[in-house]
Image: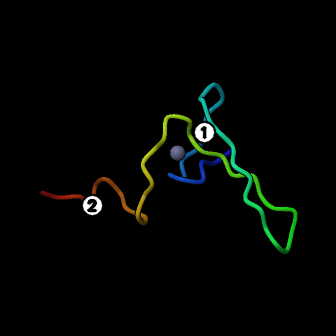
């Protein structure tokens, strides 16, 4: 499964939590998050692009 916050895969054995996103037009969706809260990416970047 993929973490809905950082977009990284949640591996077997890793702690995670689920959240149900209710949808007015459907059955809703279950989203998974890393349990130790991960950092949400503002947008797609690669570490190699960060320069100081
Ligand atoms: Zn995550």
Numbered disc in front, either 2 or 1? 1
Residue 15 place in picture, x, y as percent: 60, 30
Front residue of 9 and 33: 33
Residue 41 place in picture, x, y as percent: 43, 58
Within 10 angstroms of label 1, few (less than 14), some, or many (20 or more) residues? Answer: some
Q: Quadrant of the N terminus?
A: top right
Image quadrant in which you'd find residue 33: top right
Farthest-out residue, right = 27
Residue bearing the label numbered 1: 10
Please name the residue shown 85% across and 74% down the image: 25
Q: Is 18 on the left or on the right of 49, as rendered?
A: right
Residue bearing the label numbered 2: 49
Farthest-out residue, top = 13
Q: Quadrant of the C terminus?
A: bottom left
Q: Is 52 on the left or on the right of 17, as rendered?
A: left
Q: Is mark 1 within 8 Å of ligand 1?
A: yes
């Amino acid at each position: 499964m993929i973490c809905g916050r950082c977009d990284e895969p949640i591996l077997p054995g890793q702690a995670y939590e689920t959240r149900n996103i209710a949808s007015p037009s459907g059955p809703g969706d279950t989203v998974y998050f890393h349990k130790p809260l991960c950092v949400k990416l503002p947008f797609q970047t690669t570490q190699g692009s960060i320069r100081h």
